[in-house]
Amino acid sequence: MTNQETSRESSLADQRAALLESIRRLHTRSYRGMWAIAAFASASVPVMLSDRIFPPLSPEVKKMLGMPPSSNMISALLVVYAFSAILLVLGRITNASPKMVSFSHISYLICFYAFYYFSGVLPENFWAVLATGMTILSLESYHIWSLSMAKIREEEETLVLLERRIGFERGREH
């Protein structure tokens, strides 16, 4: 075997290893949306029990925070946020956009929990925020999963071609 053939075989082996690593990373990435759903669900448990866990706001804290927004205003903002977020996710799904924003939604949704808590109407609105969050995060999870699976299929096809080429190169040597 010549030096050039050894170098070429080493290069093909390196390409194969890189493809296998890429496929492994893509499989890991495909679960990112599910991790976001789990994180939001975990953050929602103490919120659901907020009347038992968190002490009521003292008059000083209420005075410092000022007049809270009305329940109707917060609900209207939640509807606008949900509508906007769902449209953006559906747009990314339709366009196969590589942009993924699942974890940023969690902070927005927790803010809605906080607004309802400070307004004193969290128990009545908890399920609305939870359902909104699960809907948005499920769509985002599907987007991440479908993009990752499409890329995995591409990488696996490339891997099959490369392995055929490696087999062909070895077969020619013998």
Image: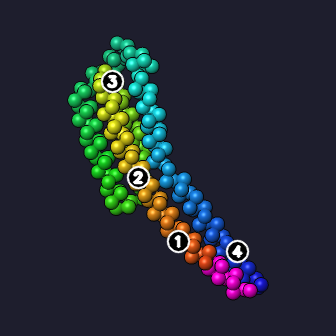
Task: Answer with mark 1 or mark 2, whichever residue precedes in sequence.
Answer: 2
Residue nearest the observer in this picture, 139 or 60: 139
The residue lying at 38 percent from left, 15 percent from top is 56
Task: Answer with mark 3 or mark 4, whichever residue precedes in sequence.
Answer: 4
Q: Where does label 3 land, which residue? A: 123
Which numbered marker is on residue 142? 2
Q: Where does label 4 land, which residue? A: 10
Check residue 167 for magenta coloring. yes
Residue 22, above or below 68: below
Q: Where does label 1 land, which residue? A: 157
- Residue 63, horizontal then vertical, whole percent: 32, 16
- Residue 72, horizontal then vertical, whole percent: 22, 29
Label 2 Cα crowd, 10 Å radius (few <14 / some 14-19 / many 20+): some
Calculate the distance from the C-alpha at mark 3 to the C-alpha at mark 4: 63 Å
Label 1 Cα crowd, 10 Å radius (few <14 / some 14-19 / many 20+): few
Q: Which residues, given as a range, are shown in magenta? A: 165-174
Name the secondary structure under disc 2.
Answer: helix
Label 3 Cα crowd, 10 Å radius (few <14 / some 14-19 / many 20+): some
Q: Are marks 3 and 4 in contact (CB under 8 Å)?
A: no
